[in-house]
Image (tube, coloured by chain):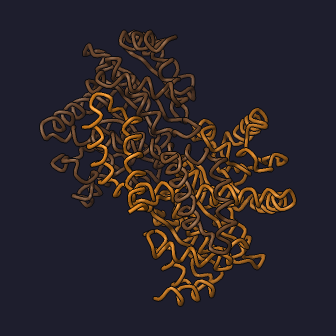
Chain colours: A orange, B brown
Amino acid sequence: MSLESLLEGIAAREPRALGRAISLVERGGEAAEKLIGRLRGRTGRARLVGVTGPPGVGKSTLVEGLARLERAAGRTVAVLAVDPTSPFTGGALLGDRLRMQALYTDPGVFIRSMATRGALGGLAAAAHDAVDVLDAAGFDLVLVETVGVGQDEVDAARAVDTVVVVLAPGLGDDVQAAKAGLLEIADLFVVNKADLEGADRAVKDLRSMLSMAGEARGFAGDGAEGWDVPVLAVAASRGEGLEAVDAALGAHRRHLDSTGALAGRRRQRLALRVEGVLHARLLAEAGGRAGLEALVREAETEAGAEADPYRLADRVFRGLVERRREEVAG
Amino acid sequence: MSLESLLEGIAAREPRALGRAISLVERGGEAAEKLIGRLRGRTGRARLVGVTGPPGVGKSTLVEGLARLERAAGRTVAVLAVDPTSPFTGGALLGDRLRMQALYTDPGVFIRSMATRGALGGLAAAAHDAVDVLDAAGFDLVLVETVGVGQDEVDAARAVDTVVVVLAPGLGDDVQAAKAGLLEIADLFVVNKADLEGADRAVKDLRSMLSMAGEARGFAGDGAEGWDVPVLAVAASRGEGLEAVDAALGAHRRHLDSTGALAGRRRQRLALRVEGVLHARLLAEAGGRAGLEALVREAETEAGAEADPYRLADRVFRGLVERRREEVAG
């Protein structure tokens, strides 16, 4: 498929073209970069919502419920599952599969799972690129499901405008886990499995954590300080409380629009993507991981006993700049 | 405390000095780099073992059990908990706290938790540096507990020579989660909570996954292909099966030594650390995240419609090299 016909297929929300485009950005490299370049000017219209949280809290069930609600309101929905524990990615129990079948056969819904991008890119970069594809395809809502524990997943969650952090009672460690990174990215907390014991307590704990965190939350300068992060209890598998979540998502989007925070977030996101590309470029400059290992060994031989990672990095960095300089000069 | 007295305190395994040193590497920056530089030549003696896996599988209970066994054999143990869901990091239930009290008061044991390093370093870099501190302090065994889900945690887990991946039955998604990144880093699988239903099944599933993954496992070139990853069932809270885990850890270390794979792993680890420092240096060169955002905005204005992340990164990169070149020249 040529780039032109791929672009046509994306614009027509043609599932096969969308699948190919996402496979392309998963692989990364020049072809992916060309595609992303051509999507500029076509993106920025979709509502981008991330759903993240520890494994086992029912993120997929929530995503599925939200997708149904939005479809019932006549809007198109794309789901991108970058969570290896998500039923969308193939790890479904039979019940999950049956439940989701209706979504899979709805032409107004596109579901795609994503594995880690290997090579020099990384999961977050691939997720951001895939969101570009789905946004450019004209979906009204793009839901990105990530397992929110590591930094890479937190970065992937930042591919969106609104981040929903899902927790559940009875995991024991849930609120502790939330403290690490999830608190700072949450625009909305959902305590799922509200029918289980401990749900009220989890809601209360989160609310007091949020009020303690106070002004510390949010990334600096996003202008969203005026937003009080709601904590909502739902029972996603019974469909209870989903309307309130959907309404809160709408309210957050209006907040971002009215305060100008949306533009700020998108600027930060672009800078984050550029940072990821810079890292990949630097690594490519070194000849990839194997090349870097060789350069480190060289630097180690030269440096002798002073070969700590910091001084080795400085040697390697100087070497790379030097090399580039000679290329420019010669 | 001066650097010299800090180094003396580390060499004497003085808890206050160790605590300060780890706080220092958590903060990062020049002082941390100086310390790490001074530790070269003092590291490389400790056995470094990582314990990783999803939240709630009982990693800390396993770590605690292993620490007890090693202490009983007369060896000193340091525990570094970089897992926000670990009881060691403060997220303990009362039962956990009581159970661990004996460890905390044993002078042959040092326990320290670690939060994410903010700024330009990152969790993995701080974990690697902290392992250097504990290794240089002369502990026989350094146990690093991480929550093994994201890339950053996987990188942190690579701060060690032997990686134990812990799973438990009844999490439903455990084996699926394992597929994502955990399989490739595991030198040893432990299925904890072997007294629960589904443990046998989990062990069987892992074994068949491992035999399917076959030669795909391990990072390329580590020379460890000759190692058959064991899958052991334990009930850590009852102390059942811990001896077998301890024995497997010893066997893996002997395998690394006898095949020369240990040196290869340590080289890869050093290259990984250098890669992290390079990223931080590049970001510092751009003036940190805020500086990078400004550079991206500049580049965007210049590039106009062609302002996709890849082309913006190339512009920013060229600009940084240019600037560095002028500095060298002028």
Horizontal side, residue B56 vs residue B228: left or right: right
**Residue placed at 46% from the left, 15% from the top?**
B3
Where residue A79 sits in the image (x, y, percent)? 60, 69
Q: Quadrant of residue B107?
A: top left
Judging depth in this view, the residue of A240 and B224 nearest the camera is: B224
Q: Check the image and report above or below for B61 versus A284.
A: above
| Relative vertical location of residue B126 with respect to residue B316 in this rendering, above or below | above
Considering only vertical position in the picture, is B279 above or below A137? above
Left-right relation of B70 to B14: left
Which quadrant of the view contains residue A244? bottom right
Q: Quadrant of residue B163?
A: top left
Looking at the picture, how far across and down is residue B62, in whole percent? Answer: 38, 30
Q: Residue at horizontal 53%, vertical 50%?
A: B326
Answer with left or right where residue A239 lies relative to residue B326: right
Can residue A237 be seen from the camera position used here?
no
* Residue B67 position in % (x across, y down): 35, 22
Place of residue B153 in the rendered image (x, y in percent of width and height, measured from the top left): 46, 43
Front residue of this view, candidates A148 and A10? A10
Classify residue B57 as left or right of residue B269.
right
Q: Residue at x 76, y 50 (%)?
A: A222
Picture layout, residue B293 above or below residue A201: below
Residue at the right extreme of this rendering:
A258
